[in-house]
Image (cartoon, rainbow, N blue to C red):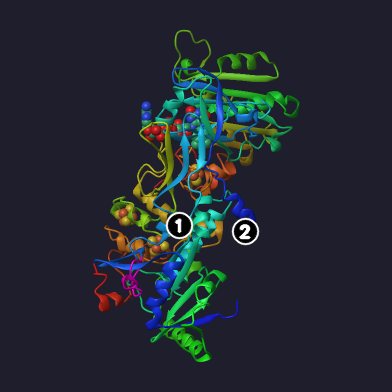
Amino acid sequence: MIDKAILLEKMKTSPYKPMKARIIEAKMVTENEKFFKIELEGKINLSHEPGQFVMVSIFGFGEAPISVCSSPTDKGFFDLTVRNVGMLTNALHKLNEGDIVGIRGPFGRGFPVDNMFGYDIVIVAGGLGIVPLRSLIRYIMHNRNDFGDVQILLGCRTPREFLFKEETKEWMRRTEIKFKCTVDRADPDWKGNVGLVTSLIPGVDINPVKTYAVVVGPPVMYKFVILKLLEKAIPDHQIIVSLERRMRCGLGKCGHCQIEGIYVCQSGPVFNYAQLKDFRGECHEGECYEKKI
Amino acid sequence: MKVKYAILEKQDLYRWVEYLKIKARLYAPKKKENLFVFGPVKNADEICLDYIPTILPPKKYYFPQKEKLLEFSIKPFKSEKAIKEFEEYILFGVHTCDIAGIQCLDVVFREYPEDPNYLNRKEKMTIIGIECFKYCDKYANCTSMGNNVPRGGYDLMMVDLGQNFIIHINSEKGERLVVELDYIKEAKPQDLAKLENFRNEKKKMFREELNAPLPEVYKAFSEYESFHSEVWNDVGRRCVACGNCTAVCPTCYCFDIVDELELTLNDGLRYRIWNYCQMDDFAKVATGEDFRKGRNSRQRHRYYRKFKYPVDKYNRYFCIGCGRCSRTCMADIILIETVDSIVDPANAQNYKGLIKNMPEVCQITQDTGACDDR
Ligand SMILES: Cc1cc2nc3c(=O)[nH]c(=O)nc-3n(C[C@H](O)[C@H](O)[C@H](O)COP(=O)(O)OP(=O)(O)OC[C@H]3O[C@@H](n4cnc5c(N)ncnc54)[C@H](O)[C@@H]3O)c2cc1C
Ligand code: SF4
Ligand code: SF4
Ligand code: FES
C-alpha cells in the first residue's frame, strides 16, 4: 500500500488531464487520412516507445486513442496519422497548423525493441496498420546497426490508400531494408503486385529462430498472416501483433478495452502470439483461432 | 485507541444520529415505497436499519453516476481538475456486503495509475456499518462470498443486541464519533458475551447459498469448457441487455467519458458517466468490429468479471453477494442459478426459476411488507 502522504499529493492532479500541444504541420495524405506533426507545450519530448499510443482530446468533442507514428528518436515533436471515421477524428481533420489539441499519455506497451536487438525483422502491415509500424520502422532506421535483416511487407486495398509514399520510396532506395507491397485491387497506373499481403510471405527468406515478425492490420488479417508465419516456423513469442479495442480512459479502469482479464490499454496494444493464443474468445475471428459463441 | 467496543442504548439512537448530522453530511437507508434507498437524512426517524439491499448501492456517493473530471476551455486552452473540494460524509447503516463492495473499488482505484476523484471521495468517507441478523431474501449469496459477517473496511460497526447496539470501533475516525459522548459507554464483558452469542446464532441461520464452496467456483470458471458452456447461451437468450444488473452492482465500475459545452461553446466540463458492459456497443470499435457481440458473451463477461478475472488480478472476488443483479433482472437471470450451473452442468437441466433451499418469503417482508416477492 502506498504512503498516504504521497497519495494525497497525487490526488491534487489527475491522470485525466490532457497536456497542451500544438499542431506544427498538418496535411492530408490520402482521401481519408490526415497526418499531423505535434509539439508538446515547452517542446518537451513525449518519451514514448515505438508502438505506444496517446489519447488525443479536442474539448467539446471528446478523446480517442491514436498511435504515435514517429520514433522516440525523432526529438521535440511526434507524429499522428488519423483516419476520419467519427466524431473526434472528424473534428481533428478540421484542424491545421497552429491549432491546439490535448494529449494524454503515452499509454500501453510498445513493441519489445529491446528484445529485438540483433534479430532479423519481418514487418507485415495491412492498411492503416502501417501507422503504428512507422514508429518501429523509423526507430530501426535510426538504430540500423542494432538489427539484422529488415523486410517490410505492405498490403493495401487499393493504390490510393497507400500511406507514406515518399517515405516508402526512401525506404526502397535504402538497400539495407527490403520492401515489398501489394494491393487487393489494382488501378491502371499500378505496376506492382496484386493480391493479399499473405501472398508475399512465402517468398521471404528467413531464419525463423533469428527472426521477429511484427504484424499490424485489421483484425481479419491476423489469422491468415499468423498461419503463414507459423508455417515458416517462427516461434510464437517472436510473432508480435498490435490490437485495436474501444478505449475511453487508457488507465485500465473504464473496462472498454478488456479482453477477458487483460486491459489492452495497459498490457497491450502490443502482444505476442503466445499471449494471444491464450485468449479463449472475445477476439475477432481473425485474431485467434478459438471457437466463438 | 482504547475502547474497542462501545454500547449505545436504543433510546439514544436518534440522539446519536442528530450528533452525526452535525459532524458531516449523513446518508442512510430509507424506505421508498416497497423498496429501500440510500439518501440524505433530514430526520432521524427516516432511517430504516432493518432493510434489504437498497436499489442502488451507496456506490452513488463515492463513484457518482455522473461526475466532473475536468474543467476546460478551448481558447485559451485550459484543462483543470474539476473538483478541488470534497465534503466529509458519513454512510450510516451500511450492510457488511456493501462494505465489501467499497473494498473492491478501493483495490481498483488505488491501483496505479490511481484515480484521484475516487480517492478524494474515499478520503472524506466515514462508514458506520450494521450487521445483519436476518436473511435478506432468496437472491442474496452473501454467506458463500463470506460477506455476511464484518471483515473490516469500516470505521464503526453496529450490532443490534436487542435493547442496545454494540459498536465495534475500527478506526480513529470512528472513535472520534463516539468517545466524547457520555451516552455511549465502553462495553462490558457481558455485552461481549452477548455479541458472541449473536454470532453463534447467526452461524446456525446463514447457509452457503451456492452449491459449491468458492474455491470450486473459481476452479470451474477457470475450466476451458466453462467459457463455452451452454449456460451462457441460455442466459444470453433471455437477457434483454437493459444493463440494470450492472447499474445496481456495487462492484461494477465501467464508465464512459463525455464532454459538455456551455452556451458560449468555449468553456465546458468533461464528465465520467457509468457505462455498462451489457450495452451492445460497449466493445465496438469505429471500424465496426464488435468484440463482444452477443448477449451471451456479454453476460459471460459480467460473470467472469466477478468470479475469475479479479481473482487472478486482485486476489478478490468481485461479487459481494448482495443479490441486487438477480433482484432487478426482468428476465429472471439469477446469479445463484447461473453459478451453480457453471460449477455443475447437471444443474442447468432443471434450471429455470428454480431457486433452492432459500427461505421462500423474504424474512424482512414479513415484518415490514417491504420487498414484495416476485
Ligand atoms: C491503440 C489504438 C491505436 C489507434 N491508432 C490509430 C491511428 O493511429 N490512426 C487512426 O486513424 N485511428 C487509430 N485508432 C482508431 C481510433 O481510435 C478510432 O478510429 C477513433 O477512436 C474513432 O473515434 P471517433 O470519435 O472519431 O469516432 P466515434 O464518434 O466514436 O464514432 C465511431 C463510431 O461511429 C460510427 N461512425 C461515426 N461516424 C462515422 C462515419 N462517418 N462513417 C462510418 N462510421 C461512422 C463508427 O461505425 C463507429 O462505430 C487506434 C485505436 C486504438 C485502440
Ligand atoms: S438485468 Fe437481466 S436482462 Fe438486464 S442486462 Fe442484466 S441480465 Fe440482462
Ligand atoms: S454480481 Fe450481483 S450479487 Fe454479486 S455484487 Fe454484483 S449485484 Fe451483488
Ligand atoms: S481504455 Fe479504459 S480500461 Fe483500457
> Quick one: which residue is furthest to the bottom in this view?
B190
Q: Secondary structure at mark 2?
A: helix
**Residue B342 showing in the rendered view:** no
Chain holding disc 1: B
Residue B309 placement (x, y as % from top left): 50, 55
Residue A124 left/right relative to B294: right
Residues indicated by labels 2 and 1 sit on the same polypeptide chain: no
User: Label for residue B62?
Assistant: 1
Image: magenta residue range: B41-53
Q: Secondary structure at mark 1?
A: helix
Amino acid type, mark 1:
Tyr
Judged left or right of residue A256, residue B374 is left
Q: How dense is the environment of label 1, judged by Cα within 10 Å: few (below 14), some, or many (20 and up)?
A: many
Q: Residues within 10 Å of mark 2 (few under 14, many from 20)?
A: few
* Subunit ID for the residue under disc 2: A
The answer to whether residue A283 is magenta is: no
Q: Which residue is mark 2?
A: A4
- Distance Cα–Cα, label 2 vs label 1: 18 Å
Nearest the viewer among A247 and A38 is: A38
Whether residue B199 appears in this view of the structure is yes
Q: Position of residue B374 (x, y in %)?
A: 23, 67
Residue A25 image label? none
Q: Amino acid at mark 2?
A: Lys
